[in-house]
Amino acid sequence: MMIGIRIHGRGGQGAVTFGHIISVAVTYEGKYGQSSQALTIERRGAPATGFARIGDRPIVERGMVTFPDYVVVIDPGMIRAVDVEAGLSQNGMVVANTPTDPKLKHPCVYIDATSIALDVLKRPITNTVMLGAFAAATNLVSMDSIDKGTRFILGKKVPEEFIELNVKAIHRAYEEARKRA
């Protein structure tokens, strides 16, 4: 079994980092994870796409996830800027950062990740916040593993106190998304 995830955001918002964290997190549960990004010239603010795969055996496929099982939308503006449902499997699901129901064709679990990020992180950094929403909506990875994956990936980039704030925001998003999942 292999699960494909496509992550939509804008350059600099961490769509690729989201994929890295999910891919590492699932390894703590004995699964295999792999992440990549679209082969485009990324500019801050331009549409950016990340990808992740979760499997029960080693993953040999590389590159874009054209037909995902899940789509994660980090930037609410992406819902109208691109067709986030393109190629999404018939039984697929969207997990979106938006304060209101985006009324998509597929089931959608949505939260206002921007408000959570501004409240907890004091910055509109929503990629990590959406990890909690993804975990609640899909049940593909535990919060313990998300915490470990977040600490592993962010530990290379940011100070410990900011990692703790991210973990707090992730847990808050998880609780919010559980109400809608």
Image: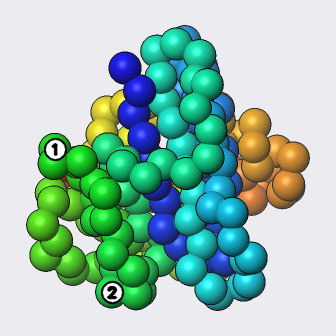
- Name the image quarter holding residue 25: top right
Q: Is disc 2 placed on a helix, strand or loop?
A: helix
- The residue beneath circle 2 is 80
Q: Residue at x 67, y 77 (%)?
A: 11
Q: Nearer the viewer, residue 178 or 73?
A: 73
> In the visual, does 5 lie left or right of 127?
left
- The residue beneath circle 1 is 91
- In this rendering, the answer to whether 47 lies above or below 24 is below
- In this rendering, the answer to whether 14 lies above or below 147 is below
Q: Residue at x 58, y 32 (%)?
A: 61
- The amino acid beneath tag 1 is Asn
Residue 63 x/y as whole percent: 61, 46
- The amino acid beneath tag 2 is Arg
Q: Residue at x 37, y 20 (%)?
A: 1
Disc sitting over residue 17 in the figure = none
Residue 52 visible? The answer is yes
- In this rendering, the answer to whether 8 lies above or below 130 is below
Q: Are marks 2 and 1 in contact (CB under 8 Å)?
A: no
Q: Residues within 10 Å of mark 2 (few under 14, many from 20)?
A: few
Residue 108 x/y as whole percent: 20, 60
> In the visual, does 83 lie left or right of 27?
left
